């Protein structure tokens, strides 16, 4: 939940790309010194390998002990109704506990809830503020999500260049769907914003890191080189990285 978005079509020509976080070579970014307990990391790994019962047990223990990554990821289990009955109120409570500790993933999850009215009244202004807080905390999912809103102009003034800056930041943190969305923005962007060379470059970057739709686009446009197996981590649990920061002129104004 809060991890899969779609870049809107532009003038009826833009192919949709699921904006899913996928880290560059694996689910665990290299060199990411985090403060999660070992049990929290094991719980996330269990979830990603399909062992939901073990994931719940470990994440429940660590969430109750105050681990912010365990809290937000346990919240995902309640939001998705996995191993437990779906309970959007409990998911919200856990996201808030996580966000209150400065966890960008928890903040991003709150943005998703408020955008879609999942367990709370739909409120785009509140959603954008939460996305902005997550962006400033360095969360690449939030960077990608906010960029989509800025590029489409949904509930916020359209700002193509700011959207691209956010996608670039998310891409630098390994978010391959941000790379693909950035590529599509150049391939299908209006007017002077269209840049086929830059678009192909970013689609290649996404494809070389396993982004399924970017790979399909690349093959359809003549690419003959080797590509890795496609990946889909739309619901994957990933550890937050404590020392990351993000930048956005839009967010500075909204959160100051």
Image (cartoon, helix red, strand yellow):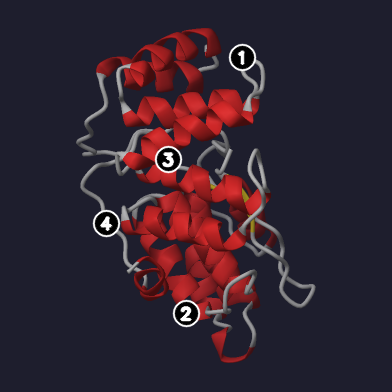
Outermost residue toward the right?
A: 12
Labelled disc at residue 106: 3
Element on which disc 2 rests: helix
At 48% from the left and 65% from the top, the residue drawn is: 202
* Residue 205 visible in the picture: no
In the image, 153: left or right of 38?
right
Q: Nearer the viewer, residue 217 or 89?
A: 89
Indicate which label's residue lies in the foreground, 4 or 3: 3
At 55% from the left and 16% from the top, the residue drawn is: 50
Residue under label 4, please give it: 245
Nearer-N-terminus badge (3/1):
1
Distance from disc 2 to disc 3, alpha carbons, whole Å, reads 26 Å
User: In this rendering, is residue 137 above or below 97?
Assistant: below
Q: Give the mark count.
A: 4
Distance from disc 3 to disc 1, alpha carbons, whole Å, reads 20 Å
Residue under label 1, please give it: 84
Element on which disc 4 rests: loop
Q: Are dots 2 and 3 in contact, CB under 8 Å? A: no
CA neighbours of label 4 inside 10 A, class few (<14), some (14 to 19), many (20+)? some
Element on which disc 3 rests: helix
The picture places residue 256, in percent across and down from the top left corner, at 32, 69
Q: Are dots 3 and 1 in contact, CB under 8 Å? A: no
Residue under label 2, please give it: 161
* Residue 232 visible in the picture: yes
CA neighbours of label 2 inside 10 A, class few (<14), some (14 to 19), many (20+)? few
CA neighbours of label 3 inside 10 A, class few (<14), some (14 to 19), many (20+)? many
Distance from disc 2 to disc 4, alpha carbons, whole Å, reads 19 Å
């Amino acid at each position: 939940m809060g991890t899969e978005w779609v870049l809107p079509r532009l003038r009826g020509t833009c192919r949709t790309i699921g904006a899913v976080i996928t880290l560059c070579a694996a689910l665990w970014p290299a060199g990411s010194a985090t403060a999660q307990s070992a049990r929290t990391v094991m719980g996330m790994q269990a979830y990603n390998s399909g062992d939901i019962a073990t994931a719940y047990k470990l994440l429940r223990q660590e969430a109750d002990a105050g681990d912010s990554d365990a809290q937000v990821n346990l919240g995902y289990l309640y939001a998705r109704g996995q191993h437990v009955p779906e309970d959007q109120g409990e998911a919200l409570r856990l996201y808030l506990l996580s966000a209150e500790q400065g966890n960008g993933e928890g903040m991003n999850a709150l943005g998703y809830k408020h955008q879609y009215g999942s367990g709370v009244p739909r409120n785009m202004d509140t959603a954008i503020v939460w996305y902005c807080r997550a962006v400033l905390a360095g969360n690449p999912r939030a960077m990608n999500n906010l960029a989509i809103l800025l590029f489409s102009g949904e509930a916020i003034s359209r700002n193509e260049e700011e959207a691209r800056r956010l996608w670039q930041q998310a891409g630098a943190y390994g978010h391959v769907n941000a790379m693909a969305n950035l590529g599509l923005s150049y391939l299908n962007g209006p007017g002077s914003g269209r840049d086929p060379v830059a678009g192909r470059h970013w689609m290649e970057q996404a494809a070389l890191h396993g982004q399924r739709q970017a790979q399909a686009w690349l093959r359809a446009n003549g690419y003959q080189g080797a590509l890795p197996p496609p990946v889909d981590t739309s619901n994957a649990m990933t550890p937050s990285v404590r020392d990351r920061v993000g930048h956005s002129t839009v967010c500075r104004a909204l959160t100051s």
